[in-house]
Amino acid sequence: MTVRLVPTIKHEKENDKTATSFTEEWVEYNAIVVSEITEKPTYNTIEVKPVADIWIGESVIKEGSQKFLIKIKKYQNPRVGEACNIKGLFKMPENFEDFNYKDYLKNNNIYLLMEFPEMECSGKREGFILQNILVDFKQKLNKTISEHLKEPQSSLMMGIIFGQDRLFSEKFDSNVRMAGVSHIVAASGYNITILILAGSKLLKFLPLKLRLFLLLFLIWGFCILSGLSPSIVRACIMTSIALVAMILGKKNTIHVTLPLAAFIFVLIDPKIVFNVGFQLSVVATLGLVYLQPALSNIWKKVFKKSNGFVEDTLLTTLSCTLTTLPITIYTFGTVSIWAVVANCLILPVVESTMFLGIFGLIFLKLFPLLSVLLFEASNVQLKYFELVVNLIGKVGWGYWELEKVGIVVPIVMCVFLILLCIYFYPVEDESHNFYLKISN
């Protein structure tokens, strides 16, 4: 790990030094667009990567060493992989009052930005051809969704299926944050968690191994459909390791394979540990593996009986919500008392909404009428999503933006969850539980 970390730190220091040299300098360079457009209220942003070294005096930004964030006007529409000539003034990113924007961009290998530069794109596509094809395909699907659903339902559907970043109205976006359900419509591996939960319930009637094989194909089909989003690819790889282990009859090896997969990712790219999407996908999966069985065990001990809905829906939702809560508090400095309630109300519906949307897109050409019916059904559920979020927003309290949360509160929450899992995680033979409960 140290061998990988040292070059990473060195690379970051070099980029910091170079960025300082290029600040407030007018530069012309050629680059390739490497991200989809992110919509903002008054402008849009894209990320580009230079295709040749950029020099100013003795300072140089080497080809491919970093990306630049470009603010563009609303009418501009450069595509992923498109080659562009860009002329503008480099600036250093500035932190917001309660958010370290510079570090956030550094974790994405971005050290400089340009605001509304002169930009001429050739229309020629370069870069990874498969990614270009998949992104174009996804954008066509997004257009189809927009034709069948109104706002904010269409944007909600795009977020649920593709993790697509969309621009909600200011009021609705505020309500989503207050309800603590932003992760459902954000670009993260949380989508895979939802898909696994829904797929497991839908295919419950099948033998275990066949069900696991189908889940494996399902998540990778979804990954391709989403345009190979990096966060979703990571979540698919981690989930695939666990599924393959279970297929091979190594169910207990999940406790090894999941941390091992996370370690491999960090070994390849140490900075990935700061990526919120990576963090959410890891802890949400750990919540399903460890916290859900512990909560289910508590339920059985208290009520002396099993309940399918509670264990399969309520407790799985609760486990994912609780395990992601420390990251939400630390990263975004927000806490909502509505998060658990809203997620328990919305996530069971989101699972079926995802499938209705996916099958609506699949059957669009083959069975148009069925596709319309599926979209109408998903529209009803998305209106329910909107209703829950807006009702919580109308309450007007129960959501706080915390100043200088620090690391202590999230650590205390993590320790509590870990102790909860250790003490209540079900073991077949209590005499072999060497955590806290030694043989009676």
Image (cartoon, rainbow, N blue to C red):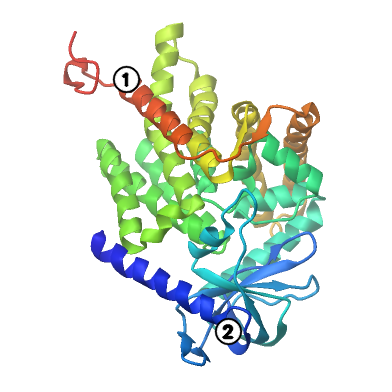
Whether residue 336 is visible here, answered yes or no, is: yes
Q: Residue at x 35, y 57 (%)?
A: 265
Q: Position of residue 103 (x, y in %)?
A: 51, 59
Q: Is residue 106 left or right of residue 353?
A: left
Q: Residue at x 45, y 14 (%)?
A: 299
Q: Residue at x 38, y 72 (%)?
A: 11
Amino acid type indicated by mark 1: Tyr
Whether residue 205 is visible here, answered yes or no, is: no
Location of the C terminus (image quadrant): top left
Q: Position of residue 222 (x, y in %)?
A: 53, 55
User: What residue did someone put label 2 on?
Assistant: 31
User: What residue did someone put label 1 on?
Assistant: 423
Pick the front one: 220 or 115:
115
* 370 relative to 233, above or below: above
Pick the front one: 239 or 16:
16
Could you tell me which secondary element the residue under label 1 belongs to? helix
* 113 relative to 378, above or below: below
For mark 1, does the 10 Å Cα neighbourhood hold few (<14), some (14 to 19), or many (20 or more) residues? few
* 53 relative to 201, above or below: below
Q: Position of residue 104 (x, y in %)?
A: 53, 58
The disc placed on residue 50 is: none
Could you tell me which secondary element the residue under label 2 belongs to? strand
Q: Residue at x 43, y 56 (%)?
A: 234
Location of the N terminus (image quadrant): bottom left
Compute the Cα span from label 2 to label 1: 54 Å
Q: Position of residue 64 (x, y in %)?
A: 46, 80
